[in-house]
Image: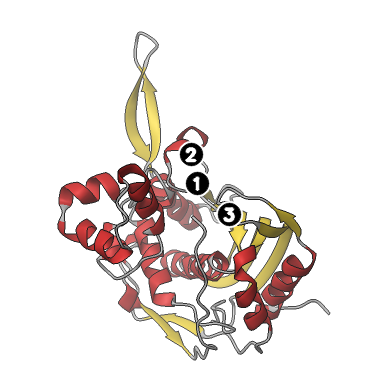
C-alpha cells in the first residue's frame, strides 16, 4: 500500500537517510541524497500538510509566503516580525566581509533601526519574490541596444489566467531566472509551480530542484498548499491536490538526531485550514486571515542551518 499524508514524507526521510548517496555539498556539511521523488497531498477535505512529528512554526511560514508575494528582497520586513529564517545568509556575508563576529540578535537589531545598514546588508538580491512579481524585462532601442522595461508580474498574470482561461496548460511561474542567479543570496530551491483546474478544483505541482528534508521541506510543503488555497479562494475554486516533485532530496549529515527522533514519533492528523475573510486580492492577505485548527504536533526538534 502506498503511504499517504505525513507517512509518505517519513518514508522518504527514512529512505534518504538509510539508502541515500553520501555527497559533498556547497556548505561543506555533507548530505545523504536521493534524486527524483514525488509526494501527493489531498487538500480537498480542508486539511493542510503541516507536519505533526515535530512542531512547525507555521505563522513564520505564512509571513514568509506573504513576503514572497509582496515581491520583497530585504530581510527587514521579516525580522521586524520576529522571523529569522533568512537572516543566516546576509549575516554570514557580513561576518566574512567585515571580520566582525556580530551575534544574530545584534545584526537583526541593526537591520531594524539603521536604514543604511539594512539596505546594504539586509538585501538578498533578486530572490523569490523579486522574480515572482518583478521579473526583469528589456526593450530594444533603435540602435540595437537594450533598456530596462516594466518588470513582469508573474503572479498577477497567473491569477488572471486562472480566472479567464482555466483550461490553459500555461499556469506556471518560476524563480529560476538564469542570468540573475549569481546575484541571489540563495538560488531558488522551490523553483517552479504549475496549476491545473478541473471540476471546479484547483490543483498544483511544486518542482523543487533541491530540498533539505529536515528543515526546508516542512515550510515548503505548507506554503505550497497555502498558496493553492489562497489562489483557489481568489479565483473561485475549491482546493484539489498538491503534488510535490523533488530532484535532489537530501538530509544533512549533522541532522542525524533530527531523523532518529522524528522517525520514532507517530504522525497525527493534519490540521484544517480556513480563512477569516476573503481579501480584496492575492496580495492583501495577512497572518490574521489564516486560521489553523486542530494542530497537535510533537515537540519542536532543533537542528542547525547549513549556509
Please tell me which of labels 3 and 2 falls first in the chain.
Answer: 2
Would you name the residue on which mark 3 appears?
Answer: 194
Asked if the residue under mark 1 is in contact with the one under mark 2, i.e. CB atoms within 8 Å, the reply is yes
Position in image of residue 135 (x %, y %): 41, 40
Would you name the residue on which mark 1 appears?
Answer: 187
- Note whether 58 is above or below 244 in the view shown: below
Determine which quarter of the picture holds residue 150: top left
How dense is the environment of label 2, judged by Cα within 10 Å: few (below 14), some, or many (20 and up)?
Answer: some
- Note whether 131 is above or below 147 in the view shown: below
Q: Is residue 163 left or right of residue 52?
A: left
Determine which quarter of the picture holds residue 66: bottom left
Q: CA distance from mark 3 to mark 2?
A: 21 Å
Would you name the residue on which mark 2 appears?
Answer: 181
Considering every residue shown, the one lying at the far right of the view is: 1
Please tell me which of labels 3 and 1 falls first in the chain.
Answer: 1
Q: Secondary structure at mark 1?
A: loop
Position in image of residue 278 (x %, y %): 35, 73
Q: Secondary structure at mark 2?
A: helix
Q: CA distance from mark 2 to mark 1?
A: 6 Å
Residue drawn at x 49%, y 88% as measured from the top left: 295
Amino acid at each position: 500500500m502506498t503511504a499517504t499524508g505525513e507517512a509518505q514524507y517519513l518514508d522518504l526521510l527514512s529512505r534518504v537517510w538509510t539508502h541515500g548517496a553520501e555527497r559533498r555539498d556547497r556548505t561543506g556539511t555533507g548530505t545523504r541524497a536521493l534524486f527524483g521523488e514525488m509526494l501527493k497531498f489531498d487538500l480537498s477535505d480542508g486539511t493542510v500538510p503541516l507536519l505533526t512529528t515535530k512542531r512547525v512554526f507555521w505563522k513564520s511560514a505564512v509571513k514568509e509566503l506573504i513576503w514572497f508575494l509582496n515581491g520583497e528582497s530585504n530581510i527587514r520586513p521579516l525580522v521586524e516580525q520576529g522571523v529569522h529564517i533568512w537572516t543566516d545568509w546576509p549575516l554570514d556575508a557580513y561576518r566574512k566581509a567585515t571580520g566582525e563576529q556580530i551575534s544574530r540578535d545584534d545584526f537583526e537589531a541593526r537591520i531594524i533601526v539603521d536604514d543604511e545598514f539594512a539596505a546594504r546588508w539586509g538585501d538578498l538580491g533578486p530572490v523569490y519574490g523579486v522574480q515572482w512579481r518583478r521579473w526583469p524585462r528589456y526593450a530594444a532601442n533603435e540602435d540595437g541596444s537594450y533598456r530596462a522595461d516594466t518588470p513582469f508580474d508573474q503572479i498577477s498574470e497567473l491569477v488572471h489566467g486562472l480566472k479567464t482561461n482555466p483550461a490553459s496548460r500555461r499556469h506556471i511561474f518560476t524563480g529560476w531566472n538564469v542570468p540573475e542567479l549569481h546575484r541571489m543570496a540563495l538560488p531558488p530551491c522551490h523553483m517552479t509551480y504549475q496549476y491545473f483546474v478541473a471540476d471546479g478544483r484547483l490543483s498544483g505541482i511544486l518542482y523543487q530542484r533541491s530540498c533539505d528534508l529536515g528543515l526546508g521541506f516542512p515550510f515548503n510543503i505548507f506554503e505550497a498548499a497555502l498558496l493553492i488555497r489562497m489562489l483557489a479562494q481568489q479565483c473561485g475554486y475549491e482546493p484539489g491536490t498538491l503534488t510535490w516533485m523533488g530532484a535532489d532530496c537530501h538530509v544533512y549529515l549533522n541532522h542525524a538526531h533530527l531523523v532518529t527522533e522524528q522517525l520514532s514519533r507517530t504522525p497525527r492528523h493534519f490540521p484544517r485550514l480556513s480563512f477569516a475573510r476573503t481579501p480584496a486580492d492575492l496580495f492583501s492577505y495577512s497572518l490574521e486571515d489564516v486560521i489553523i485548527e486542530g494542530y497537535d504536533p510533537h515537540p519542536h526538534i532543533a537542528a542547525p542551518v547549513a549556509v
